[in-house]
Amino acid sequence: MEWNSIIASMIKRTLIPILADALASSPAVALLGPRQVGKTTLALEVGNAQGGQALYLDLESEQDRARLAQPELYLADHGDKLVILDEVHRVPGLFPVLRGLIDKNRRAGRRAGQYLLLGSASLDLLKQTGETLAGRIAYLELSPFQILETPHLPDDVLWVRGGFPESLLAKDEARSLRWRQDFIRTYLERDIPQFGPRIAAETLRRFWGMLAHHQGGLLNTAQLARNLGVDVKTAGSYLDLLVDLLLVRRLPPWHANLGKRLVKAPKVYVRDSGLVHALLGIADKETLLAHPVVGASWECFVIENLLAAAQGSDVQAYFYRTSGGAEIDLLLAWPDGKLCAIEIKRSLAPRVERGFHAACADLNPLRKFVVYPGKERYRIAEDIEAISLAELAKEIHG
């Protein structure tokens, strides 16, 4: 399939208007996301939309780092431009300089949106910016391509290959899988050592693979530690690192005091479905459909797409489970207290289980949906609708 040249030109990132709004209202914006997800491409597109006045500096480049030998002077000389600083964690000494320049511009009454900081790790960047740029910076996350951005592709292609551009737009399944395998290897051998203590690549790959096998399951750090042959603290640090690199998500349980015995452990899953399949050696859809991970892979694919669609709306995501069997796969909570309960089924004739009804009776969500692979939208019950992933993502995105 010749996806690359034709489809790439059709894809428009849903984050563009959100990023533009953030730049218009905040003197600095941090755009976070894994490597190879398209942060630089998006940043340059937004910069070009501002009349081509953006200044782009790749801080992994020795030449660009040399320009910042005197950062306050250099950046002050370009104070009339949007300055894009890629892989900003490479030069942590920049953050106090940025704070000084932002405050100076504020006193002079100059416009917001002067600095766009790109980073591949959330914790590392948040620690540094949180200490120096509090009240001066907005945070956004760029996910891999999501279903709202790829309407010209069959949903199954996005699910099987995942949303990283080079994987999704590869010419065939073999090249897509090879790219993902190379991506994993590069992260383990080159990228991860930049962000934490030295970890043997093979050990961390086994751990990442365990998470893929356990996709969407409740976190049991002690069991992971035993399987890996390390102590619990070490296994926890490995998980924290993958979460901070935006490669793994911990989905927290709903924690309201309802007089129920609630499950307290988070669910954990590898965020990109294509990486899950690469870690498990799943090359194509036929192999995936015969693999035990198929249901969990689909569930997590749906969750990740819906959360990407919800970005910018201050929605919080949870799951709900009690010891008595009441369960909701995804619970979306808005700041005004409204709840949306979402059940996820990999079936063209989805049925709602007793546990979903019991959970909804506990929480009384405003809306209830069952996401399934079909296209038709219809009522399963008086207050429960079956809906496609793309249609529900569109509703949530607004």
Image (cartoon, rainbow, N blue to C red):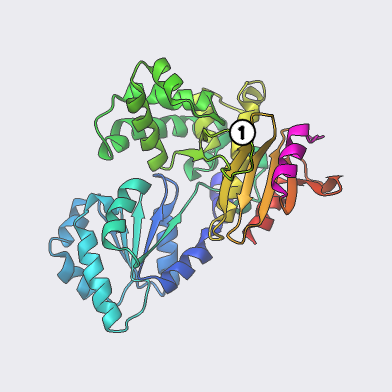
In the figure, residue 218 lies in which quadrant? Answer: top right
Q: Is residue 95 above or below residue 76?
A: above
**Residue located at (33% from left, 19% from top):** 230
Q: Is residue 241 magenta?
A: no
Callout 1 crowding tier (Cα within 10 Å): few <14, some 14–19, many ≥20 = few
Q: Is residue 354 magenta?
A: yes
Task: Give the magenta range.
Answer: 348-364
Name of the residue lying farthest toward the left: 70
**Residue 352 image point, x, y percent:** 79, 36
Horizontal relation, residue 257 to residue 238: left or right: right
**Residue 269 image point, x, y percent:** 52, 34
Front residue of 4/229: it is: 229
In the figure, residue 86 lies in which quadrant? Answer: bottom left
**Residue 125 image point, x, y percent:** 32, 51
Q: Is residue 149 above or below residue 79?
A: above
Quarter of the image with the C terminus is bottom right
Front residue of 353/259: it is: 259
Q: Which residue is under mark 1?
A: 261
Q: Amino acid at mark 1?
A: Arg
Quarter of the image with the N terminus is top right
Horizontal relation, residue 130 to residue 8: left or right: left
**One can see residue 329 in this view:** yes
Horizontal relation, residue 230 to residue 210: left or right: left
Name of the residue lying farthest toward the bottom: 108
Secondary structure beneath label 1:
loop
**One can see residue 147 in this view:** no
